[in-house]
Image (tube, rainbow, N blue to C red):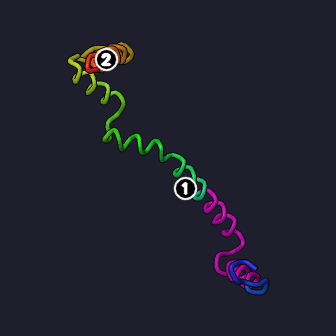
Amino acid sequence: MIGGLGPLEITILVGLFFILFGAERLPKMAHALGRSKGEFQKGLTNTSQTLTDLEADGRTPSQLLVQRARAVGIDPAGMEVDVLERKVSALESMDSSSEE
């Protein structure tokens, strides 16, 4: 028994669904329900990305890099991202080692 329903009750429910929705529409509804469940599961597994976004206060990685660059005294205008990242990382590591 499923949830306290016997075979007769399940048969009546299935027949009622066929009468209300038709044999053509039920498979479409089942497919849509399956896709919705898949999207829900995918959303649950993407929580780590969402938490990262929340911790960044809605800023993109390049905006965070610009903010870090300004914090260590670099003007990021016109610099390539990888060069800026190396300079910021180097200055941040120097700052953290001098604080110790």
Q: Where does residue 82 sit, x and y in percent of width and height?
A: 39, 16
Residue for point 64% across, 59% down:
34
Between tags 2 and 1, which lies in front? Answer: 2
For residue 40, which numbered disc appears in the image? 1
Q: Does dot 2 land on a helix, a strand or a loop?
A: helix
Q: Which mark is residue 71?
A: none
* Magenta stretch, residue numbers: 10-35
Position above or below: 46 against 90: below
Image point 61% across, 63% down: which residue? 33
Q: Is residue 1 magenta?
A: no
Q: Disc 2 to disc 1, how far (Cα)?
A: 45 Å
| Residue that mark 2 sits on | 97
37 or 83, nearer to the observer: 83
- Identified by mark 2, the residue type is Ser
Magenta stretch encompasses residue 33:
yes
Q: Residues within 10 Å of mark 1 (few under 14, many from 20)?
A: few
Residue nearest the viewer, comparing 19 with 85: 85
* Picture layout, residue 26 above or below residue 53: below
Compared with residue 12, is residue 56 higher up or lower down, i.e. above or below? above
Q: Quadrant of residue 90?
A: top left
Residue 5 in the figure: left or right of residue 38? right
**Image quadrant in which the N terminus is located:** bottom right
Q: Which numbered disc flags the more N-terminal residue, 2 or 1?
A: 1
Q: Magenta region's main secondary structure?
A: helix
| Of the pair 77 and 97, the residue shown nearer to us | 97
- Residue 16 position by quadrant: bottom right
88, above or below 53, in the image: above
Determine whether the residue tagged by mark 1 lies in a helix, strand or loop: helix
